[in-house]
Image: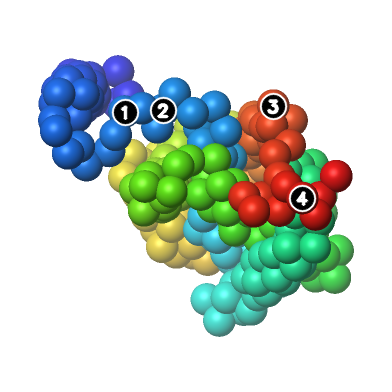
Amino acid sequence: MWRSTEVSGLLGCAVAVLAVFVWHERRAREPLLPMHLFANRSAILCWCTIFFTSFQAISLIVLMPLRFQSITGAGADSAALHLLPLAMGLPIGAYFAGRQTSVTGRYKPMILTGALLMPFSILGMAFSAPQALVLSSLFMLLSGIASGMQFPTSLVGTQNSVEQRDIGVATSTTNLFRSLGGAVGVALMSALLLALLQDSSFAHLAGSSLIAEGGSGNVLLDGLNAAPGDAQNALRAELLLTFRHLLMVSAAVSLLGLAVAIAMPNRVLRGREDTVR
């Protein structure tokens, strides 16, 4: 389906509309999105950081409950509780990073720490079974902390890297990249999950009806619950392996965020030049 005429046409239309938008913004007297901001290296790297962070955080929030339900057979309420460590880690990481940035006057160390922690925490989730609640919750908490450390500091870094007159539009552009990262992350990781299921022995065990293009998570869960005992155990084992491969890909994507964090200039916050060495 990715090579279909419909998808190719939509992608072509998106590229054309983007080109027209850039052409118009470069010639407008008061552009909605000034193109000179994209010549600012620090701002670009902060936007890339928040894109990859949102890519990981939102896709994990969507896919981890499905992983827990499909492998353990638990209900939606248990899956929501399973997601709690990830949700708790976000404000913990944001608070810690904000305090440390305020004390040190530099935002890059916190972004780099979160970017380093992210791939290790995702790999930990990949190789810990959902039934191992303590271990799985620990890695989900670390993943939430890693995301939380990068969200506010990337925003501060963006605001710090542009001129005073551009702070408003730079902040809104940061929110744009955050939304794009989440949307792209959910779409790509969900599509990859479907592709992995189709290429695995799960397709032969479950039948094509469970993993048809556009099939929802409810169809997958209902089909698993309807399978007999031995077949159900085999399906859950195959799903565990598939989600492990999916999380390994997610960890590899997070390395792009780490590369961006490494390339980011270690600048001092505006107004703190005299107090920070």
Residue 140 quadrant? bottom right
The front one of 277 and 45 is 277
Which amino acid type corresponds to the residue marked 1 in the rendered image?
Answer: Met
Q: If you read the primary sequence from the N terminus, does the residue marked by circle 1 or circle 4 appear first? A: 1
Mark 1 vs mark 4, foreground winner is: 4
> How far separated are the C-alphas under marks 3 and 1?
22 Å
Q: Residues within 10 Å of mark 4 (few under 14, many from 20)?
A: few
Q: Which residue is pictured at 67% across the width and 32% down the height? A: 264
Q: How is the image coloured?
A: rainbow
Q: Residues within 10 Å of mark 2 (few under 14, many from 20)?
A: few
Q: Which residue is pictured at 44% across the width and 23% down the height? A: 39
Q: From where the camera sits, is residue 145 visible?
A: no
Q: Position of residue 114 (x, y in %)?
A: 74, 49
> How far separated are the C-alphas under marks 4 and 3?
25 Å
Q: If you read the primary sequence from the N terminus, does the residue marked by circle 4 or circle 3 appear first? A: 3
> How far separated are the C-alphas under marks 1 and 4?
32 Å
On the image, numbered disc 2 is attached to which residue? 38
User: Is 250 on the left or on the right of 13, as rendered?
Assistant: right
Which mark is on residue 35?
1
Q: Which residue is pictured at 36% across the width and 53% down the height? A: 168
The front one of 31 and 188 is 31
